[in-house]
Image: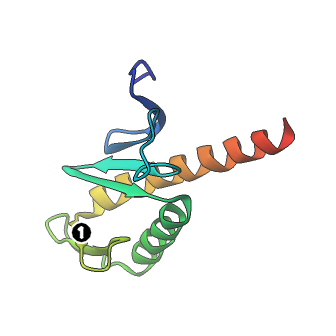
Amino acid sequence: MTDNYDDISVIHYNDFGVAFNWKESTVFSKNKIQLVFKSTGLLLSKHQLFTFKSEIEYVILNRCNCSEKSKNLIPSPCEYISFALSNSELMGLMDLLKGVCFNIQLSDMLENII
């Protein structure tokens, strides 16, 4: 996937999902990152995104090594919503979040240099 969309700037993607910024930010989406995986879209601040990544890392370290049919209950940045993900989905989400966080940190670092 290349960034050839008129209304978004792709930050990172993998087979599990995509993260991007809206080019035309509204008050609601200004300084937020849209994270889309499975059939879910989350509009998160950088802080929420990094916190979500930390929570996923915690779940991965403490998960059951059960069959692929079992699900891991993942807390979301919204306190009323949790996600049920298989081990492979959990790893896909972790890979997506690692890439997004890396690209955000790299972009922030380059902005500070320039």
**Along the line of sight, which residue is nearer the eye, 48 or 95?**
48
Relative to 61, is 114 on the left or the right? right
The spot of residue 60 in percent (x, y) is 41, 72
- Picture layout, residue 46 above or below residue 112: below
User: Which residue appears at 40% of the width and 21% of the height?
Assistant: 6
Where, by quadrant of the figure, is residue 22 drawn? top left
**Along the line of sight, which residue is nearer the eye, 107 or 64?**
107
**Which residue, given by chain and number where applicable, does mark 1 sit on?**
83
In the displayed image of the protein, which residue is found farthest to the front?
27
Mark 1: which secondary structure? strand
- Picture layout, residue 55 above or below residue 85: below
> How packed is label 1: few (under 14 Cα within 10 Å), some, or many (20 or more)?
few
- Give the amino acid at mark 1: Phe
The spot of residue 79 in percent (x, y) is 31, 79
In the displayed image of the protein, which residue is found farthest to the top?
4
Relative to 56, is 37 on the left or the right? left
Dividing the image into 4 quarters, which one contains the C terminus? top right
User: Which residue appears at 76% of the width and 40% of the height?
Assistant: 111
The spot of residue 43 in percent (x, y) is 37, 55
Number of callouts in the render? 1
